[in-house]
C-alpha cells in the first residue's frame, strides 16, 4: 500500500501533518526499539520535542509581552488625552501619529507579539490531525492494521468489513475516522475505521472473521498495548468509554485524562499570567482603566480555559487529552524558565536590540534609521501637516461665516414684509447690474 502521506495535496495543514507524521514515525520506531511501543509515550516525547523547538518563539512572545507592558502606560496616556474626541478626524490622526511615535521609540509595534501565535496555530492543527488518525500519518502504526486487512483478504474483504459495520451499527465510527458515507471504499478507510474500534468491538470483529482469528487476535493484542495509556484507549473518546463502562471503576477511569487535562491547563495558565501580575499591579487601577479590564479578562480565562479542556477532552479521542496534558505540563515548566529569564531581562538592552533589527530592515529598503529623536521628528512633521490642514479648514469656515453674516445684514429676514423687502433689494441689485 502506498502511504497516504505520499499523496499530493495543496492543504498546508496536511503538509504540516505529513511532516510531523514522519517525526512521529521516527519516535515510534525508537520507543519500539527499546521495547516500549506505546502511542501515549510517543505523544509525550513528540510534545517535548516540539515545545523545545518552539522555545525561541515562546521567549520572543514573552519579550514582546514584557515590552508591551512598558509601552502601555504611554499608550494609555495618549488614549486618555484624546478621550471623547473619537468623532474628530484630526484628533484621531494625531492620536495615531503619537501612538506610532511611541512604538517606534521602543522598536516595536502593536502586532509584534502576534507572529509567534500565528506560527503555533497551524502546528497545533497539524498535531491534532496526527493524533486523531495516527495510522494515516505514521507508517509503522498503519502496518499493524494493514496486516489485519491482509490476513482477511485485502481489498476483497472490504464488503465483509462493511457488513460488519452495518451489523454492529458502527457507522458513527466512520465519522470519527473522517470517512464520508456509510461504508469504507478503500484500504485506507478500512485502516482508519479499525483504529477507532474499542476492546469489545475488536472482540466482535475477531468473531466475525473467525477463519483468521488467531492471527488477528495476536495483532490486536499489539494494537491494544500500543493504544493503551493509563488504562485508556487513545483512539477512543472518554465519553464513549464512560458510556460503555458498566461499573463505577470503569467510569472513573474514563474521567482520568479529562480531569488531568483541566488541572494541568489551570496550572499552566496561572504560571503564564504570573509574570504579568508581577510587572503590573492592577488593584489600585480605576474600574474603567483598560489595564484592569485586561487583567479581569485574564482571570476569567484562567477559569474558562481549564473547563474547556475538560469538555473537549471528553469528546475528543483520548490521545488528544494526553497531548493536552503533556503540552500543559511542558508549558508550565517552560514558563517557569521563561519567567526567570524575563526577571533578569535588561529592558534598555532589549529596546536597543529591537531598534537595531528595525533599522537593519529599514536600511535594506533604503529608509532612514529610526531612533527616539527620529520618532519625535516624525511626530512633529505629522503635527505640522495636520495643523496646516486644520488652519486651511478654519480659514475656509471663517470665510464662509463672514459671507453668511454679510448676507444676513444685507438680506434681513423675519416677517413677511422683511422677505418682500429682500426680494425687492435683490431685484434692484440685479437691475443696477444691467
Image (spheres, grey):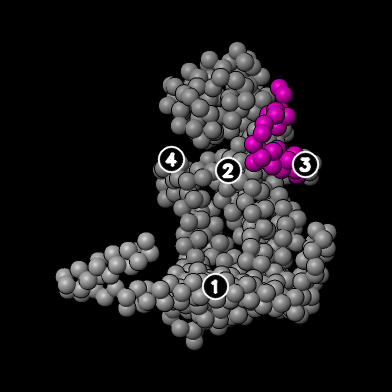
Label 3's element? helix
For the residues carrying marks 2 and 3, which lies nearer the camera in this image?
3
Tell me residue 26's x, y (percent).
77, 41
At horizontal 50% and vertical 22% (from top left) the residue drawn is: 183
Q: Is residue 186 left or right of residue 433?
A: right
As measured in the structure, the alpha-carbon distance from the residue carrying label 1 to the one carrying label 4 is 78 Å
Query: Can residue 397 be seen in the rendering of this structure?
Result: yes
Q: Which residue is mark 3?
A: 26
Q: Is residue 207 above or below residue 130?
A: above
Q: Can you tell which quarter of the image residue 331 is in?
A: bottom right
Q: Nearer the viewer, residue 162 or 305?
A: 305
Label 4's element? helix
Tell me residue 218's x, y (percent).
65, 29
Q: Which residue is mark 1?
A: 392
Q: Earlier in the sequence, mark 1 or mark 4?
A: 4
Q: Earlier in the sequence, mark 4 or mark 3?
A: 3
At horizontal 63% and vertical 76% (from top left) the residue drawn is: 384
Q: Which residue is mark 4?
A: 244
Query: Can residue 35 be seen in the rendering of this structure?
Result: no
As measured in the structure, the alpha-carbon distance from the residue carrying label 2 to the one carrying label 4 is 15 Å
Q: Which residues are magenta?
A: 1-27
As measured in the structure, the alpha-carbon distance from the residue carrying label 2 to the one carrying label 3 is 19 Å
As measured in the structure, the alpha-carbon distance from the residue carrying label 1 to the one carrying label 3 is 71 Å
In the rendered image, the quadrant that contains the C terminus is: bottom left
Q: Earlier in the sequence, mark 1 or mark 3?
A: 3
Amino acid at each position: 500500500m502506498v502511504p497516504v502521506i505520499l499523496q499530493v495535496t495543496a492543504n498546508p495543514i496536511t503538509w504540516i501533518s505529513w511532516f510531523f507524521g514522519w517525526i512521529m514515525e521516527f519516535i515510534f520506531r525508537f520507543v519500539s526499539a527499546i521495547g516500549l511501543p506505546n502511542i501515549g509515550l510517543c505523544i509525550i516525547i513528540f510534545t517535548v520535542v516540539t515545545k523545545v523547538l518552539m522555545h525561541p518563539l515562546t521567549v520572543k512572545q514573552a519579550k514582546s509581552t514584557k515590552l508591551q507592558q512598558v509601552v502601555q502606560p504611554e499608550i494609555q496616556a495618549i488614549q486618555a488625552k484624546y478621550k471623547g474626541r473619537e468623532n474628530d478626524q484630526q484628533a484621531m490622526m494625531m492620536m495615531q501619529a503619537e501612538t506610532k511615535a511611541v512604538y517606534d521609540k521602543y522598536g516595536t509595534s502593536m502586532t509584534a507579539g502576534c507572529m509567534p501565535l500565528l506560527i503555533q496555530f497551524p502546528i497545533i492543527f497539524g498535531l491534532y490531525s496526527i493524533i486523531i488518525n495516527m495510522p494515516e500519518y505514521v507508517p509503522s502504526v498503519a502496518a499493524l492494521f494493514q496486516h489485519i486487512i491482509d490476513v482477511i483478504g485485502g481489498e476483497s474483504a472490504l464488503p465483509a468489513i462493511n457488513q460488519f459495520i452495518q451489523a454492529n451499527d458502527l457507522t458513527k465510527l466512520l465519522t470519527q475516522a473522517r470517512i464520508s458515507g456509510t461504508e469504507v471504499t478503500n484500504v485506507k478507510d478500512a485502516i482508519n475505521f479499525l483504529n477507532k474500534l474499542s476492546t469489545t468491538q475488536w472482540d466482535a470483529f475477531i468473531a466475525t472473521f473467525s477463519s483468521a482469528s488467531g492471527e488477528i487476535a495476536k495483532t490486536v493484542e499489539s494494537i491494544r498495548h500500543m493504544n493503551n495509556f493509563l488504562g485508556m484507549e487513545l483512539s477512543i473518546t472518554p465519553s464513549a468509554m464512560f458510556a460503555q463502562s458498566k461499573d463505577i471503576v470503569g467510569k472513573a477511569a474514563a474521567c482520568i485524562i479529562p480531569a488531568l487535562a483541566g488541572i494541568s491547563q489551570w496550572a499552566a495558565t496561572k504560571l503564564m499570567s504570573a509574570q504579568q501580575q508581577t510587572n503590573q499591579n492592577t488593584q489600585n487601577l480605576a474600574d474603567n482603566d483598560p489595564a484592569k479590564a485586561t487583567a479581569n479578562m485574564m482571570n476569567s480565562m484562567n477559569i474558562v480555559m481549564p473547563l474547556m479542556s475538560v469538555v473537549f477532552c471528553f469528546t475528543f479521542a483520548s490521545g488528544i487529552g494526553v497531548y493536552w496534558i503533556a503540552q500543559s505540563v511542558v508549558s508550565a515548566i517552560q514558563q517557569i524558565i521563561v519567567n526567570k529569564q524575563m526577571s533578569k531581562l535588561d529592558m534598555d538592552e532589549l529596546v536597543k536590540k529591537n531598534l537595531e533589527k528595525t533599522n537593519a530592515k529599514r536600511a535594506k529598503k533604503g529608509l532612514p534609521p529610526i531612533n527616539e529623536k527620529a520618532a519625535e521628528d516624525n511626530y512633529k512633521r505629522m503635527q505640522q501637516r495636520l495643523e496646516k490642514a486644520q488652519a486651511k479648514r478654519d480659514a475656509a469656515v471663517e470665510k464662509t461665516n463672514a459671507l453668511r453674516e454679510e448676507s444676513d445684514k444685507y438680506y434681513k429676514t423675519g416677517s413677511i414684509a422683511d422677505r418682500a423687502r429682500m426680494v425687492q433689494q435683490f431685484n434692484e441689485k440685479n437691475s443696477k447690474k444691467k
